[in-house]
Amino acid sequence: MKLSQQYQSGNLVLPSALLFHFKDLFPSADDFLVWQFFFFQNTSKLDEIASSQISQAIGKSTAEVNRSIESLQEAGLLQFKTIELAGEIEMICDAWPALEKLDELLQPPPVEKPLSEPNDFKVLVGEFERELGRFLSPFEIEDLQKTIQEDKTSIELVRMALREAVFSNKTNWRYIQAILRNWRREGITSPNQVVAKNAERESQQQKSVQLSQDFMDAMNLWKD
């Protein structure tokens, strides 16, 4: 049962989670303290607690208590409603919205699916089969799904590994898996990092070629 439901069913001890999520809920410590008076009023079925009573209890002015009440209302933690009872209009307060917000905070975050669209994986399989020149086996398709879902590898990164394999003329799934493993060991998790790594490699190759040419020029001068 949710905290807000327990609250509505009767008296409830202040949940400890409210303290540990205090900064996520309440604008200030004074607002939290004022809210507890209305929480007590609701759970103990008191008719009303006046702002002046709260101010005397916590050593704050009535104006400061009223500001806290306004702050709680603006934050959606406290609600005031008017009802008609025996021909008279009365105002009641509800402190339970704070517990509803607490329930929301305690909900586990939604699991993010690595595939943004159901067709993304089908498109990727089609690209593999086109580049490899054959249909993927059920085992290869299962491995590809595990790579994306369990290893948390993005589809675009798998696609780049496929391109690397095609460029190296080694179009097989094991070679592509090896590329992805090497990238994981090097901490590469995004396409941008692959692009940066390739640019650095090309730069080093160019420097190597330049050094070799300088060496050859020096040798020619020595011969003269």
Image (spheres, helix red, strand yellow):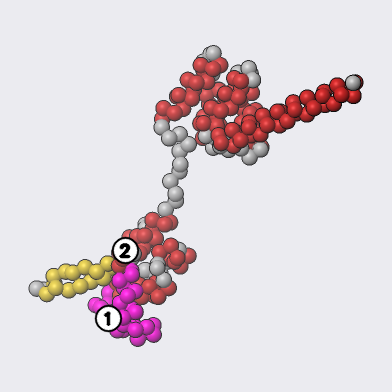
Disc 2 marks a residue whose amino acid type is: Gly
Please tell me which residue is depicted at 45% across the width and 65% down the height of the picture: 23
On the rendered structure, is 80 left or right of 100?
left
- The residue lying toward the viewer, choosing from 184 and 84, is 184
| Quarter holding residue 139 | top right
Q: Is residue 108 above or below residue 73?
A: above
Magenta-span inclusion, residue 53:
yes
Residue 181, image x, y percentages: 64, 32
| Quarter holding residue 29 | bottom left
SS under mark 2 = loop
Please tell me which residue is depicted at 34% across the width and 60% down the height of the picture: 100
On the rendered structure, is 218 left or right of 31?
right
SS under mark 1 = loop
Q: Is residue 185 above or below residue 68?
A: above
Instruction: Tell me the quarter of the image containing the N terminus.
Output: bottom left
- From which residue to which does the magenta span run? 43-72
Q: Which residue is mark 1?
A: 50
Q: CA distance from mark 1 to mark 2?
A: 20 Å
Please tell me which residue is depicted at 80% across the width and 27% down the height of the picture: 214
On the rendered structure, is 45 left or right of 133?
left
Please tell me which residue is depicted at 41% across the width and 30% down the height of the picture: 118
Q: Which residue is mark 2?
A: 76
